Image (cartoon, grey):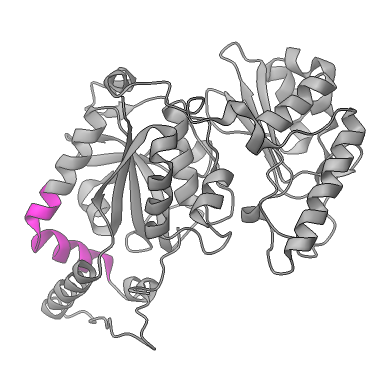
Amino acid sequence: MASHPAPRCSPLRFWRTLACLGTLVLTGSLQAQQPAAPARPLDSLTGENVWQTTADQFQQHFAQTGLQWLSEKRDQARFFGPGLSLWQGRLPVTEALINFSPEGQPTRISLSIFNRGDSNSEFMTREKFEALIEAHRATIGQQLGVPSTERGKDKTTTAAAKAPSVTKDSLTANLKREENGDVLIANVPMVDQGPKGYCAVATAERVFKYYGIPVDQHEMAQVADSSSDGGTSPAKMYEALNKLEGRLRVRVRVIENWDYKTFMDMVGDYNKEAKRADKREVSAAPRDGTIYIDEIYGAMDGEVLKTSRIGRDRSGFGKFQRSITGLIDQGIPVMWGVMLGLLPEPEIPQAAGGHMRLIIGYNLKTNEFLYTDSWGAEHALKRMPIPNAYTMTTGIYYMEPMK
């Protein structure tokens, strides 16, 4: 999530998978010219026996195609990046997701043929986009010998079909309380946003899937107007989630949101502490009427900011901790907006700037929050001291089922 200027199968079964699950995600733009990538054919996904393979067989068969498992449970696999295609290269594929049953067999295949987050929008016009849709539609219809179905007219995508499959009272069954003090929400699905700025919509997708609602990050990106490099602003993300409240039967709540006055007060407190610690103060003066939040945060010393935020706002720090632990105790994951680069975090793909992640647990013995990033299985569970977490926080949101 980037910060923003402020205050400014059988063939028939396979086709049904494409049509009903929205895998023809043509929400993007024309790919910029790139050097030819090595071919990575996915033709085997359309075979009759793909639904009878085991996870081990799937791994062996696609080992050279760049298969990635999104969780240690191996309940979802992913292909991503250049060179993917179907039918001897006739249909390019940007991303493929394969869901597996607890018994280890494929149950659903979702193909993203084109999407805004992984494509370059510079040269795409409406006419070119519609022509691209028709070309892909013709290719798919010719290969499978069945007509396409408009997803928007599919009765399975009604609000009732996408209502949560869990109730608020049932969520505590997902809590694990370990002897070491960990209180952790288990079973939060992993989503890999890839290299694009989709952290906010990918985080939302994970919460929706945790509640049993089949919404994906590309759908969310369309509603929230996310871009590949610019990400999603907190305001637009909150607005998008509010639009979906009634349809998806969830309540969207804000614990902390970006606020101009609060931000300026924080800068003032920081400068007082920086002066006391003989560190450089920062300027929040606008340029051409715009305040560049990333630049202000980038000029701050993380330790000075931690001292100023906690030392000058003990009640705010206490509320932050109580609010999050209270939600975790209810089995509700917390959508956590942060500013990276303030404090050391080794081995993360994004070194600085706005980001969104999920808090899924806590440990009061070690004074840590347990969290997860939407960057794949290796980022499924991490830990951070609660004071550090408070220091880098830019927003706190959560969703809960209405029933």
Residue sitting at x 24%, y 82%:
280
Q: Nearer the viewer, residue 5 or 84?
A: 5
Where residue 183 appears, as percent x and y from the top left, is: 26, 28
Residue 101 picture location, percent across and down: 59, 16
Q: Is residue 180 above or below residue 119?
A: above
Q: Residue placed at 27% from the left, 70% from the top?
A: 301
Quarter of the figure with the N terminus: bottom left
Residue 188 in sight here: no
Residue nearer the viewer, 284 or 66: 284
Dividing the picture into quadrants, the one containing residue 402 is: top left
Task: Identify the main secondary structure in magenta.
Answer: helix
The magenta segment is: 301-318
Question: In the image, what residue occupies the spot 43% across and 50% down?
Answer: 240
Q: Is residue 303 left or right of 47 when viewed as pictured?
A: left
Residue 161 percent coordinates (x, y): 51, 25
Q: Is residue 350 magenta?
A: no
Residue 51 seen in this snapshot: yes
Residue 162 image position (x, y, % from top left): 49, 28
The tally of labels here is: 0
The answer to whether 109 appears left or right of 36 in the picture is left
Which quarter of the figure has residue 173? Answer: top left
Q: Seen in the image, is 162 located left or right of residue 394?
A: right
Q: Nearer the viewer, residue 359 or 366?
A: 359
- On screen, residue 170 above or below 205: above
Given residues 164 and 257, the one toward you in this image is 164
Q: Residue at x 51, y 54 (%)?
A: 349
Looking at the image, residue 236 lies above or below residue 85: below
Is-magenta flag for residue 315? yes
Quarter of the picture containing the C terminus is top left
